[in-house]
Image: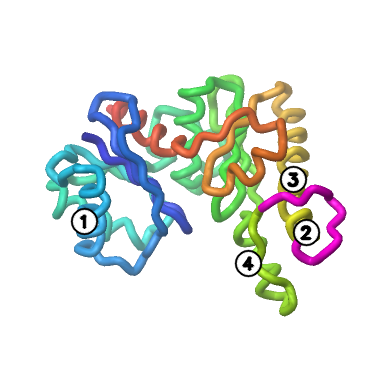
Amino acid sequence: MLLTIDVGNTETKLGCFALSGSELLHFWRVTTDSKRTADEYGVFFAQLFAAVDLRAQDVQAVVISSVVPKLDSTLQQACSRYFDCEPVFFKPNRQTIMPVVTERPGEVGADLVAAAIGARDLYGAPLIVISYGTATVFMAISPQGEYQGVAIAPGISISIDALVGRTAKLPQISLEAPQRAIGTDTISALQSGIIYGFVGQTEALVARMRAEMGVDAPVIATGGMADVVARHTSIVREVNPYLSLIGLRLFYQNRT
């Protein structure tokens, strides 16, 4: 079995595939914790696996993308110790499955390129992939299937935390869209500004990116906050939370 691990700043996604298959057999989304030791990660993996009747020895290979360098050595030790295999780390500037044509490919997030690879495999090219995570990242995949570039904005959760944290009287809110854009109380006003504001951001940036790409590229969304925006706009064709894991699987199965 192949274990894929996508370590983000806020969340870590894990998925299990057959070593040479394409079906996602198991999926977990957990909070990223850079304070865990290798042994703690080993116990944590065992607990996740036990819930679905998997054993550590079922894992024959591990591939990891990470934007938290502090965890790389910890995860390497955990995989070596508890799965008895050395993990393969996905690096955007060293992979050959998708050309990255930005000015500095080494600066591109591994999770983003992995998601772009997964999206291109499922939906083709051209494509715009939007990742709603710690940041909201709009990725352009060219008609030739290249990772063309991105636009990066503050994520939804970060924006809410900053607003509430700096304004004493504003309450925490649930991410539900109000019936009207014009709020008549504090909660509905916040919900309108946040949800319809991010919907507007999505629609405006997609329109500009399509114009620059010269093609009406389909839009696919991923990330923990994708549904919050996608259900309020027709511009998003589909939400797929597994894109980065699929990209890691493709990278592992096609590496030379």
Camera sees residue 148: no
Are dots 2 and 4 in contact, CB under 8 Å? no
Image coords of residue 245 (percent x, y): 39, 38
Q: Residues within 10 Å of mark 2 (few under 14, many from 20)?
A: many
Inspect the image, locate mark 1, and give the three-letter code of the amino acid beneath it. Ala
Are dots 1 and 4 in contact, CB under 8 Å? no
Residue wearing tag 4: 161
Specify the segment rendered in magenta.
Answer: 176-188
Write the residue at 21% across / 56% down. 78
Residue wearing tag 3: 201
Viewer-nearest of labels 2 and 4?
2
Inspect the image, locate mark 4, and give the three-letter code of the amino acid beneath it. Asp
Name the magenta segment's main secondary structure: loop
Badge 3 element:
helix
Viewer-nearest of labels 3 and 4?
4
Q: In screen coordinates, is 183 left or right of 114?
A: right
Residue wearing tag 1: 78
Residue wearing tag 2: 188
**Split into 4 quadrants, where in the image is the C terminus?**
top left
